[in-house]
Amino acid sequence: MQIIKHIIPLRDSVEALRNGAAGRSAETVALIPTMGALHEGHLTLVREARKRVDHVVVSIFVNPTQFGPNEDLDAYPRQLEQDSATLEREGVAILWAPDVTEVYPEGFATNISVSGVSENYCGAARPGHFDGVATVVCKLFNQVRPDYAFFGEKDWQQLAVIRRMARDLDLTLPHADHIHGVPTVREEDGLALSSRNRYLSPENRQRAIALPRAIRRTADRIERGEDVSASLSELKRALLEAGFSSIDYASLADATTLEPLDTRPDRPARLLVAARIGTTRLIDNMPVAGSHDKPAP
Ligand code: PAF
């Protein structure tokens, strides 16, 4: 695995991968953007990508522009050596690990803001966050120029923002249709894997199981045709009773536009929740089947 820190050698190396071994050409390349502190969720992305493409590039870049003034950028876990050994074992071809000055050179003045899909949910709770994500992901796409990109579905809103951005900007490497979401990887008890889980005390780790359970139960209720607003109120009540201190949002939304839905969906929908337990903010989401999924009579 090559570890690359500058754009020119990155471009040369990706080009060499694309040209392939002697006699082959146009080999495919996938990018998995990460901020490091890798866990099984990231490795699942790598394994999925390796099934579908010839070469996998993983980026590790703790992107300062997606952290708010009250969010501790310095406290974000950094473990490049350990992550790079893990990626090497997983058969990754290139680890792209630029410094901040490589990504945001002096005078950097461009911002990509995706309206609509960015605005509610985590976008409302973390102003500017998705501008930072969209801008850095667009840059990572332009730096690596991958045929495909893979993201975890756990950050459903992030995935929706990135797909919208790729479509709106007519990106071709990767094309919006080649931006794949990979289902959330969960602990055995259902908690979604996240680098934030390490901040949970043992008691709160135990209580946190209430989050995926409440989402599953609520999705089932909505799928059975129960009232959406009553089901969401019951979800919030269950989380507070389980020991969560506050709920940032709990909403049923169109899976693509993220427009809130207040009745049983007739199109692909997602139940999205963010809630705080102790000092940790957890997010999770699940699909909700609707009337469109009913087998034809
Ligand atoms: O999901 C993440 O780790 C980050 O938001 C991403 C996509 C790597 C952009 O910095």
Image (cartoon, rainbow, N blue to C red):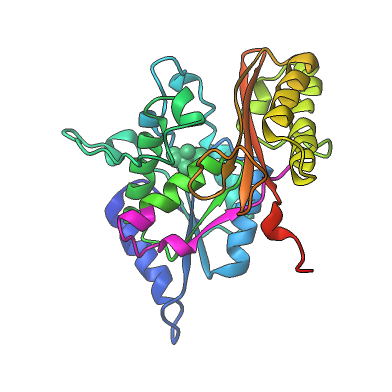
In depth, the one of 260 and 24 nearer the eye is 260
Point out the image quarter for the C terminus. Answer: bottom right
**Residue 154 in picture, x, y percent from top left:** 61, 41
Task: Give residue 167's position: percent from left, percent from top.
Answer: 37, 57
Q: Which residue is drawn at 44% across and 41% down?
A: 117
Q: Can residue 118 be seen in this view?
A: yes
Q: Which residue is drawn at 73% across and 31% down?
A: 231
Q: In this view, does 63 lie above or below 14?
A: above
Q: Is 82 one of the magenta-colored residues?
A: no
- Asked if residue 175 is among those painted magenta in the image, a careful observer would answer yes
Q: Nearer the viewer, residue 209 or 231?
A: 231
Q: How many labels does the image show?
A: 0
Residue at image x 83%, y 39%?
188
- In this rendering, position of residue 15 left or right of residue 77: left
Identify whether 146 is placed above or below 208: below
Residue at image coords 27%, 55%: 8
Residue 275 position, x and y percent, is 64, 22
Can residue 34 be seen by looking at this rendering?
Answer: no
Q: Give the range drawn in magenta.
A: 166-186
Say left or right for 52 vs 234.
left
Residue 221 location, quadrant: top right
User: In this view, which residue lies farthest toward the left?
Assistant: 107
Closest to the observer: 261 or 29? 261
Viewer-side residue, 128 vs 264: 264
Relative to 197, residue 112 above or below? below
